[in-house]
Image (cartoon, grey):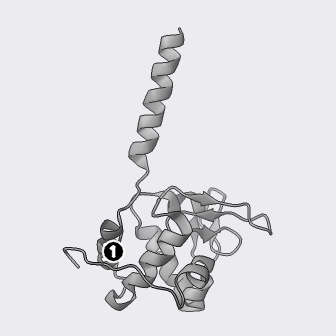
Amino acid sequence: MYKNIVTAIISMISICQALNKTFTQCELAIELKTQGFPENQLKDWVCIVEAESSRHTFAIGGPDEDGSFDYGLFQINDRYWCNNGSNPGKGCNVRCRDLLSDDITTASICAKTIYKQQNFSAWLGWVNECHHHMLPNLNCKGL
């Protein structure tokens, strides 16, 4: 019985790890370029993602001071931008859980929506760790 439980737990952990991606810096930069982020902003976007989620697609942060949570690679906040319910909603018209996917298309679209309204300053990670700081050196093949 004990052996079956241990095997089940190990299997579940393996499945969860397979469904959650941690990008390398170059993988992230190339994927952001593929998602249509401007090449001259890639260093800023990579810096944001490193500061906010450590390049993990499955990151959930919070609760923040207001009780809200942040989701995914870009740590998109559920108070303003995504809905925790079963239906899409709020500023990006998405479900928060959809921001936790290894396919970062939905998260990228939402991040661009936020950027259009608030620029990079919407992310405290950018304000505190990227703005007026040395940005990542992206010497990546494929960029």
Q: Residue furthest left?
A: 141
The residue lying at 54 percent from left, 11 percent from top is 2
Q: Residue furthest right?
A: 66
Res 70 → quadrant: bottom right
Residue 87 on image: x %, y %: 61, 61
| Residue 67 vs residue 95, the one in the foreground | 67
On screen, residue 46 versus residue 91, left or right, reads left
Above or below, 26 against 131 in this view is: above
Kindly identify which residue carries mark 1: 29
Residue 1 on image: x %, y %: 53, 8
Above or below, 80 against 38 in this view is: above
Query: Three-letter amino acid code at disc 1?
Result: Ala
The residue lying at 40 percent from left, 54 percent from top is 21
Res 89 → quadrant: bottom right
Residue 142 on image: x %, y %: 19, 75
Residue 137 is at least partly visible in this image: yes
The total number of labels drawn is 1
| Residue 104 vs residue 85, the one in the foreground | 104
Badge 1 crowding class, 10 Å Cα cut-off, few under 14, some 14 to 19, many 20 or more, is: many
Element assignment for label 1: helix
The residue lying at 51 percent from left, 86 percent from top is 133
Q: Residue furthest top?
A: 1
Q: Quadrant of the C terminus?
A: bottom left
Residue 74 is at least partly visible in this image: no
Residue 68 on image: x %, y %: 73, 65
Res 61 → quadrant: bottom right
Above or below, 19 against 99 in this view is: above
